[in-house]
Amino acid sequence: MSVQGQRGRKVARNNRRKLTTFYMAIGGVLILVLGFVGVFAITSKPSESNVTSLTAPIGRTADGHYYKGSPQALVKVTEYGDFQCPSCAVYDTGLARIIDRDYVNTGKVQFIYHEMPLTTIHSNAQTSAEAARCAGDQDQAKYWQMHDMLFINQNTWASLNSPASIFSSYAGQLGLNRTTFDSCLSSGANRALIDASAQTAVAAGVQSTPTFDVNGKQVDVSKLTSTIDAALRGLGK
């Protein structure tokens, strides 16, 4: 066999190895891309299945704010929150689930949500707060479900010029009457309530969201659990 023939075979084998390596690399990239697309589709799709599961009583306080947890609970926790606030979303999709499980559903805490839309920095804060209220007008349990839907999908609607249509789609997913919901939202039926809520939050000295009041003591999220536990111990619970 000639030297030229041997070289020809070596070149052919090398080319095959290079092509195999190339196709494997392309395949790996495609798998990564498809995986990313799949994860993105899952995480970005609005879903009512991720909302908090509550077994505690729900209702509205005397001053009109929605609560979850027994009104007889000795520890009262009020969250001053903004639906467009990223830190509020982190709390709601994380620690809030533990607070519900360990304190609210067990009757230890009555949890109250006090809207404080920071409209100077969050253009859709007011509308989102009204959307939650419009859901609650149809069914008090739906207030908390819409509350969670808004936080879970915050990145989807926060930058929109007009989020009303996507809020309407959430209402439909939650089984609400969309015509009634749309009418409520477009009419600003709850605007005055939200404005009053924001004003009382400012009057209480709240400067940022989320801020929590635990039996009259304001704390940030990092101290929430320890402050609740201290309040319970102080009451012999």
Image (cartoon, grey):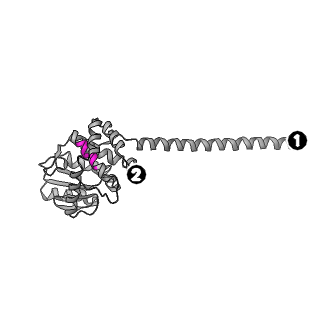
Which residue is identified by label 2? 159
Horizontal placement of 198 versus 166: left or right?
left
Q: Of marks 2 and 1, which one's residue comes earlier in the chain?
A: 1
The quarter of the picture where residue 122 lies is bottom left
Q: Residue furthest front?
A: 187
Label placed on residue 73: none
Q: Which residues are magenta?
A: 129-136
Q: Looking at this rendering, what residue extends furthest in the right direction? A: 2
> In the rendered image, is residue 126 in sight?
yes
Q: Residue 201: image x %, image y %?
A: 21, 59
Question: For the N terminus, which image quadrant?
Answer: top right
SS assignment at label 2: loop
Residue at 88 percent across and 41 percent down: it is 2
Between label 2 and label 1, give the one nearer the viewer. Answer: 2
Mark 2 neighbour class, 10 Å CA radius: few under 14, some 14 to 19, many 20 or more:
few
Callout 1 secondary element: loop
Helix, strand or loop for the magenta stretch, by majority = helix
Work out whether residue 52 can be spotted: no
Residue underneath mark 1: 2
Mark 2: which amino acid? Ser
Where residue 98 appears, x then y in whole percent? Answer: 27, 49
